[in-house]
Image (tube, coloured by chain):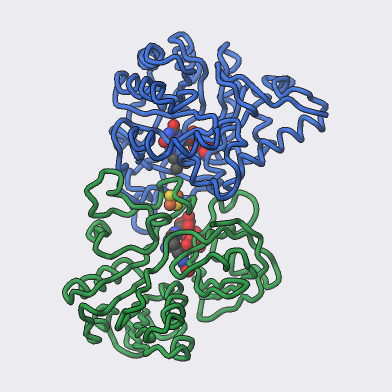
Amino acid sequence: MPVNLQIDLGGLTMKNPVTVASGTFGYGAEYADYFDVSQLGAVTVKSLSLEPRSGNVPPRIVETPSGMLNAIGLQNVGMETYLREKLPFLREKKCVIIANIYGSGPEAYASLASRLEAEGGADAIEANLSCPNVHDAQNARGGSLVAQHPDQVALYTQAIREATKLPVFIKLSPNVTDIVEPALAAQEAGADAVSLINTLIGMAIDSETRKPRISNIVGGLSGPAIRPVALKMVWDVSRALHIPVLGMGGIATADDAVQFLLAGARAVAIGCASFRNPDAALKVVQGIENYCQQHGISDVNELVGAVKL
Amino acid sequence: MACITNCKIVAHQEVAPDHRRIVLDAPDIAADARPGQFCMIEVREGSSPFLRRPMSIERIFDDGISILYKAMGEGTRMMASIPTGAYINVQGPLGNIFPIESDTVRSILVAGGIGIAPLIGLAEAIIARGARAPEVILAARTECLLLCEKELSQMGCAVTLATDDGSAGFKGFAADALRLLDPDSKTLVYTCGPNVMMRAVYDVCAAADTRCYASLEAVMACGDGVCMGCVVETNAENEFAKMARVCREGPVFDARVIRWNAFD
Ligand SMILES: Cc1cc2nc3c(=O)[nH]c(=O)nc-3n(C[C@H](O)[C@H](O)[C@H](O)COP(=O)(O)OP(=O)(O)OC[C@H]3O[C@@H](n4cnc5c(N)ncnc54)[C@H](O)[C@@H]3O)c2cc1C
Ligand SMILES: Cc1cc2nc3c(=O)[nH]c(=O)nc-3n(C[C@H](O)[C@H](O)[C@H](O)COP(=O)(O)O)c2cc1C
Ligand code: FES
């Protein structure tokens, strides 16, 4: 039985509901040794800033139970190098591109978005308003993220919305009391979809040296450890919003992905599971198709929000 | 080109207390591997441990590779319990390679403890090129942790032993032993071991106008240039290049580009 896997994520057509999470797949070419990355519904690139960034001093990562903490600090090649050196590969492969962007104010996000549109550098924009590893993350509260303030989310979303006609996704942080509030703010300000979750702020200490395991002191937790939290937030947000949700957080297998679809995600992103298995996202695509076949589902969209309560 | 394969363990033995060698049937990896490169090993299925473990390729055979490792933490201790005949999932070869120059008059390899692992394959490759067998300084805390002396001697390498406690060979640090070998501007030094040791080795090299390549370690998540987690600080001007990925730009670096005092 043929299964329709194609979905529409806020105006972005994806041939299947699977992409990768920003920062866990480079710019696509890195993993091209292992599989044809154009088989994914979309490739989401590492957060791009206007200028190159060197990021935080090492150590930047530490393994934790069923996951990892990272404080990369958005080291990236910057917009111009992306357009010149990274984009040609993605275009040549005919990948659908979700360009994740990061800037230091609404204007920076707006100019990133309009430049990407003008240069054909993206098919959709995902604005990272939720990176825990920049600004003054060292104040032990993890700093203040734009995504923690619904009024700020609205301001940033509006600025990006006005700068581009591309689909705009707003990436939200789980480090809030109620994630529905910033999600609603993004929707009202014109976002086409919301992406969630970014990492949960966490910490690890080496008891021998008494020093934090990562130099930034705190970092973002990702991996299977956060999956139940992410799933619940996707469920909350997808019920409250009419725009679609791109769900992520600890997804490693097709079964995990199906859970996110059932909870209400229109599409899913595979994050740090790719570090262990670079082709994890492709396996998820194949696994979703198998699941649909086994359960007599002809269109993957039927799964979205179909959790039985 | 890197690949991911299930490899049969054809031999797995203890070579010193807590140190083991694993020989893998891995023709695809062996076909592409060059000295200096490493693999990412999936210690076991499931999500604990969550990440693969980086391990240098010790030797490259026609149909496989060997790995020399120290069982120290959770992952490597699990590895130590995998029996011969079992399969493990290996990703590789990854990273850059030791530059080998055919007109090198003299090369010296300086290894600290388990740091000898990637230098064994390098010694073999230098000899295979027809160049003079490298001299080797094997340094460790104590005698029983001096690895591979016999193999190196059999290859024709002049081996200097150095131990912190004087239980074998020179009593003192690898860098002091290197100074006694009097390297000059025509000598090429390759080193792998603890950062403090490599830094001291580099200082000796810098003073003698000797070129030095160091193979570095860092905690890794992807091993493949994606996560930006494994960086070391460099002397580069370019903002992005100030932090170099050990898994991509390395693990082998010209010691001059590393900001050694960042490890303080
Ligand atoms: C390029 C490269 C080549 C290496 N080659 C060898 C080798 O040939 N033989 C060998 O014995 N060891 C080698 N190492 C070090 C080896 O990867 C670590 O000893 C191993 O990961 C420790 O894992 P564990 O689970 O036993 O320790 P744990 O302490 O439980 O590890 C916890 C985490 O820390 C990381 N970690 C701990 N120590 C190190 C370290 N020294 N370097 C990098 N990551 C570390 C682990 O990967 C893991 O994510 C190499 C490291 C790198 C980066
Ligand atoms: C090493 C690393 C780097 C990341 N970099 C970014 C980034 O640049 N921009 C961003 O929006 N999210 C970034 N993230 C967050 C992921 O995109 C994702 O939201 C998060 O890891 C949760 O998914 P996972 O548990 O499947 O990894 C990063 C995550 C990791 C582990
Ligand atoms: S380990 Fe991920 S970039 Fe080096």
* Quadrant in the rendering for residue A147: top left
* Quadrant in the rendering for residue B253: bottom left
Locate the N terminus of chain B by quadrant. bottom right
Chain A representation colour: blue
Locate the C terminus of chain B by quadrant. bottom left
In the picture shown, does residue A109 fall above or below B141?
above
Residue drawn 40% across the image and 88% down it: B157
- Position of residue A172 in the picture relative to residue A286 (left or right): left
Measured as percent of width and height from the top left, residue A202 is found at 43, 39
**Front one among B105 and A144:** B105
Query: Is residue A200 visible from the viewing direction of this image?
Result: no
Residue drawn 48% across the image and 54% down it: B223
Residue drawn 34% across the image and 19% down it: A110
According to the colouring, which chain is green?
B
Measured as percent of width and height from the top left, residue B248 is found at 41, 54
Which residue is most to the top?
A188
- Position of residue B83 in the picture relative to residue B130 (left or right): right
Measured as percent of width and height from the top left, residue B81 is found at 63, 68
